[in-house]
Image (tube, rainbow, N blue to C red):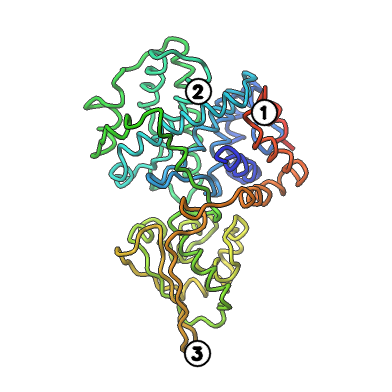
Amino acid sequence: RTFMNWLGCAVGAAQHESAHAALAAVQLLQPAAQASVLGRGEKVDMAGAALINGITSHTFDFDDTHLKTIIHPAGPVASAVLALAEHRGLSGRAVIDALVLGIDVSCRVGNTMYPEHYDRGWHITGSTGTLGAAAGCARLLGLDEQQTAMALGIAASQPIGVREQFGTMTKPFHPGGAARAGLMSALLASQGFTASPKALEAPRGMVQTVSTKYAWNEITDELGQRFEISFNSYKPYACGIVIHPSIDACSQLRAQGVTAEQVERIELKVHSLVLELTGKKEPADGLQGKFSVYHGCACGLIFGKAGEDQYADDIVNRPDMVALRRKVVATVDNGIDEASADVTAVLKDGRKVHVFVQHAIGSLENPMTDAMLEGKFHDLADPVIGRVRTGALIAASWELGTAADVRSLTALARP
């Protein structure tokens, strides 16, 4: 499920302007054709493919989320391991092993530092993703214990991403850059390049440099028994996950017959983190719209959904969307969990319609079904590679563990 969700996101954004720009930059280096750019006909070197596929998988902000840390773990790890596996003709089983272990590394380190690391301004997906990508690639390369420690040590000097970049193309660069850096860390270690064996935990190592919290037990508790990928969740809405309960609530208002024309105002009560992360009242384009709980509410009430189409620039600036956004009155109520939302539609005739969402669709408590994931994949990839090819790619994703060579899958991911 994690791999398929990541793959659909990556293919879906293959023609986005950020993908065009990133590919053009990579091609300036005149790379060898080692691995596929998903959703496109071009092939580039495996580090370039890891970069671009990491960018596209996060471009729509539609990728997976490890809710305990709000890390999007697949982007850095899957982008790196698939590029390496494709170049080497490795099996789908090997990719799954590397994905599970790489995600475990990134999320366990994230557990160690969250939330203080994130609060300091680091984009935790990129900063921990470099380590996860290095671990996954070390697994694929068959590195021994010492070489793997070196790969992680090299990666620990390359945490990527600050939150100031949210709402720009550089936010999705973070998982792409982490994928490339992690892959290069493992390749360097495979050739005897060295690093400190305590690059994570030393007083001047990565963790204590970028965080004031370091709960070391989070790295080792139930190691090899509890895998963090089992706590992964998948988004039905193409935006920051803290907006999802608000979208869900407004979609429920719509299902109860409430229309935008009837609304005098929408009273929204949320946790403070929601407004801290997504408090843009007047987003100017689709990227900014993904960080606007106000736009999310408007999407829920007007469309009953918030896929990538609802974050197009023309939709964000449509007069009825702008007008409805301005009717949303958001207030902080820290008695409400950040995964919940309390919404009341005050109508022009004086009526009030109230919805409280405790767990939005896509949460661990209310997960998307496999059929929902397939529908999301089709919505993203059909316009890029066609419905028939998308269907074949979905089937290949479900059967990834039986693939003798992942190139049978990556061939389907190109038009």
Front residue of this view, candidates 302 and 245: 245
Left or right, 336 with respect to 98, comes to left
From the image, tell me which residue sits under label 1: 43
Kindly identify the residue that appears in the image at 65 percent across and 30 percent down. 36
Which quadrant of the rendered structure holds the N terminus?
A: top right
Query: Mark 3 or mark 1, which has the lower sequence index?
Result: 1
Please state the horizontal and vertical placement of residue 83, each as a whole percent of the image.
59, 27
Question: What is the C-alpha distance between the residues marked 2 and 1?
Answer: 20 Å
Which amino acid, by three-letter code, is at mark 2?
Answer: Cys
Please state the horizontal and vertical placement of residue 141, each as a whole percent of the image.
52, 17
For discs 2 and 1, the disc positioned in front in the rendered view: 2
Asked if 35 appears above or below 379 in the picture, the reply is: above
Front residue of this view, candidates 99 and 23: 99
Left or right, 209 with respect to 366, comes to left
Disc 3 vs disc 2: Cβ atoms closer than 8 Å? no
Query: Mark 2 or mark 1, which has the lower sequence index?
Result: 1
Question: What is the C-alpha distance between the residues marked 3 and 1?
Answer: 59 Å
Disc 3 vs disc 1: Cβ atoms closer than 8 Å? no
Kindly identify the residue that appears in the image at 43 percent across and 56 percent down. 242
Which quadrant of the rendered structure holds the C terminus?
A: top right
Disc 1 element: strand
Front residue of this view, candidates 36 and 198: 198
Kindly identify the residue that appears in the image at 72 percent across and 30 percent down. 411
Which amino acid, by three-letter code, is at mark 3?
Answer: Asp
Left or right, 408 with respect to 123, comes to right
Which amino acid, by three-letter code, is at mark 1?
Answer: Lys
Kindly identify the residue that appears in the image at 76 percent across and 45 percent down. 386
Mark 2 Cα-neighbour bin, 10 Å: few <14, some 14–19, many ≥20:
many
Which mark is drawn over residue 137?
Answer: 2
Q: Is residue 41 visible?
A: yes
